[in-house]
Image (tube, coloured by chain):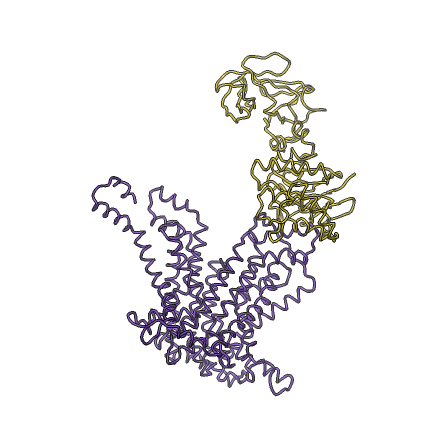
Amino acid sequence: MAVLGIEGERSHAATKVAAALRGVLNPTTLIALLLACVLVFLVANPLFQLVKDSFTNPRDHSFTFANYVTAFGRPRYVQALINSVELGAVAALFASFIAVPLAWGVSRTDMPGRGFVHVMVLASFLIPPFVGAIGWILLGGPNAGWINKAWMAVTGATSGPFNIFTFWGLALVTALYSFPLIYVFTKSALDLISTEMEEAAAILGAGPMQTTFRVTLPLALPAILGSIFLVFLEVLGLYGTPALIAIPAGFNVVTTQLAAFFENPVRVEVAAAFSMPMVGITVALLWVQRRLLARKSYVTVGGKGGHREPIALGASRWVLFGYAMAIAAFSVFMPVVIILQTSFSKAWALPMSATNFTFHNFREVLFDQMTVRQALFNTFQYAILTATICTFLGFAVAYISQRRLLPYSHLLASITLAPFAVPGIVLAICFYAAYAPPPFALYGLGALVVIAFVTRFLPIAFTNSNSAIQGLHPELEEAVRIAGGNQARALWLVVVPILKKSLFGSWLLIFIIGTRELSTAMFLSGPQTRVVSVLTLELSEQGSYEMLSAISVLLLIVTAIVTLFGATILGRDFMLRRN
Amino acid sequence: MDKLQLKGLTKKFADLVVVDDLNLTLRAGEFVSLLGPSGCGKTTTLRMIAGFVTPTAGTVEMDGRQMSSATSSLPPEKRRMSMIFQSYALWPNMTVEQNVAFGLKMRKVARDEVRRRVAQILDVVQLGHLAARYPNELSGGQQQRVSLARALVVQPEILLLDEPLSNLDANLREEMRSEIRRLHNEFGITSIYVTHDQSEAMTTSDRIAVMNKGRIEQIDDPLTLYTRPKTRYVAEFIGRSNILDGKPNGASVAFDGFEVASARLGAGGPIRTNAFSLRSQNLALHAACPNGDCVILPGSITDRAFLGESWDYAFRAEAGELRLRVMSPPVSVFNVGQKVWLEINPSHIIPIQDDQHA
């Protein structure tokens, strides 16, 4: 830029062009341009291909509405859509019944074991939804499920009362693994409400319960509602749990229906058309959620965040504690115990005994079965690659857009955030449409899975970096510049060292959710590039629950180790921080 | 009549004594400030009166009835008090009207009566036209007025104010502190005002309690506090003071370079201290040696700063080590190094308790 300034006079056209080129070709712009290309490849092009394919006749590539007619022409396809919306609504409602009392109990009351309850919520957040679903199939299967067997043993009845393979069973299991999101939002809103807000109500004559219902909860309401919407959307895009439960139960939801369109013959264009309502609902609800949370004055009202006396619940604190323990049992203890037991069993439906005990399942999974070994290896390899690329890209975009190093850098940020509005399974369709056919022909390569994962988790990496950089005063870098260092030096010597913890935190988070990502991998992993989550579905169809449990145990152990490692370095709640 | 009594009030957090055996009595309708730097225990004292904090020892009594003690504490909502918070603590989910009506609803006042009283108090604070607005649509000063209206409308037994003006800019702060005093004159509610700003305390209060390290150093009306500080701490915290070393010597006190008869000092009774306060505003500089029976010290100006409304001079006496700061009106201009005569009226020399060496 300085070069341009010196040229000043309108001299030769050639010098001006050279100067302009030098202006454009400085390292910052080059990196930024490269970044823009990467984002187009990762985000813009796949999304564009999705829309384009939905209007394209696959045979002659002409424009058509026929795909939409096919997608919505049959009542059972439309029914799948309705089922999804119903499931999302019921599960989100269940989840809020679980999460809000727990968040309130932990944040505000003298409920016993608050720290333990908090850790239990974290634990249910860490259990991959399909692992939880497998646990509940073992617990709540209509005849062989352990709950039903216990019931029959106690009452002498010939059949159990509980059937997980129903709409309500599915809704319950879904809620048990999605409520932590509402808990996190509600708790942080409750923690952020200034103590003075509640004290003002108290001094004017409101008792603890009046204060809770007239002041505290209304103030937290936007955050609670926003997170309920997010859970609704998460359930809408969920594939694993419905595939494990809804399909045997004999009904479809959008995601399982989309998967059906991918069975031979693969009808990408119909799947693309069918996914449009889901994208529409997602975009609309995210917009509403943004609006709700935009009224920032609700929670960030200043004032001395004084010491808050917990509300004394009296005897009912044990009722709340009992409720929390029941939730912990349903979402963590019971499924984990049953999975552990099954993983050491020869036959899961038989009672635990010396004759039924075996290490066989783990030997199979770790050594004998090549497909499983391959899938485990792929899973961790892809997760590590994804986390690394995401963290780097997310940081780069966040830094460039925060420091406005480029014109239109806010556009870069918006593109980076766009995948957030696309459910994972739809993203898989996007990438299939964009990069499976020639000229890219990436299908069957690990690269396709990794780039789809990167796109899927890029918004998380970006928002993490973005809020970290926001907390960093630009004067820190300006001090480096005025002392004689260039931008790169400022970045390397000041920004990265200060942010390394939060960058590491976002790497760990993406690694953990990367090991369990199912819906994005669904249509993209070929025989050699299968990941564990995809494999579990296949094993479940075959009924090999013992091996499935062994894999789940391994996945849980790795998750637990990585989380404990992260928690030691970054603090207990590093996974739960949401922006 | 005594409205509020704090007896031996003490609060410890772990080993830290925040409020230390504090005694204070407020008459009905009195406006008292707790003045002190941050960490002196003034806010904790206020929160014990409100019932948000339970004392470690001592009691809070209102109208002779015990509110707080180490063993039992009436919850805040039953004390019939009001409080103005530093952040105003207006509920952002309620309109101005709903905010103000809240306390009346809690007191189960009839609906018509609520409406009438809310309208009335909003007129008093000149916010009647903004009743339907939400707090975040108001300016800082307007929010402060809403918070005042909300506290006053319930006709509280006692009004507690916790640094209410610290979030306002300087001009608005001056306007609001006279507003607070005006409302006090109008309603006569017994009030306790916590602040670290002495001008706020001076302009609003009947009496000021200067607090230091959890104790009240001195409680007096503003003028007495200024003219007769009892301790070195108060002398230095309120206004600008020179602290003089003096040796009581029978009927007189010997200072560095001059000696004054004890009877002429600003004190009654015998003098048992070595420390004396001398306000820099009470000193006069002269270009020539003045007449009169005041103490006259020749010396020179060693430094000066023009503060706009006054000069801040550093004066050094010719003989001895005496150095004083002198505030002079803008018209009395002296140059650095200029020879001057300093005039001290002995009655402005106030013996103080020297807690620095205690």
Residue A242 pos. (x, y %):
49, 76
Question: Residue at (57%, 81%) from the top-left corner?
Answer: A163
Query: Furthest residue to the bottom?
Result: A158
A283 relative position to A367: left or right? right
Residue B241 pos. (x, y %):
59, 27
Establish if A538 lies above or below A42: below
Q: How many marks?
A: 0
Q: Nearer the viewer, residue B335 or A235?
A: A235
Establish if A484 lies above or below A380: above
Q: Nearer the viewer, residue B27 or B341?
A: B27
Q: Is residue A216 visible?
A: yes
Q: Nearer the viewer, residue B51 or A438?
A: A438
Q: Is residue B72 visible?
A: no
Question: Residue at (55%, 51%) from the top-left corner?
Answer: A297
Q: Quadrant of the N terminus of chain B?
A: top right
Q: Quadrant of the C terminus of chain B?
A: top right
Question: Residue at (69%, 32%) from the top-left corner?
Answer: B221
Residue A476 pos. (x, y %):
41, 45
Displayed quadrant of residue B284: top right
Q: Colour of chain B?
A: yellow
Q: Colour of chain A?
A: purple
Displayed quadrant of residue A95: bottom right
Displayed quadrant of residue A362: bottom left
Establish if A433 lies above or below A346: above
Residue B300 pos. (x, y %):
51, 18
A318 relative position to A522: left or right? right
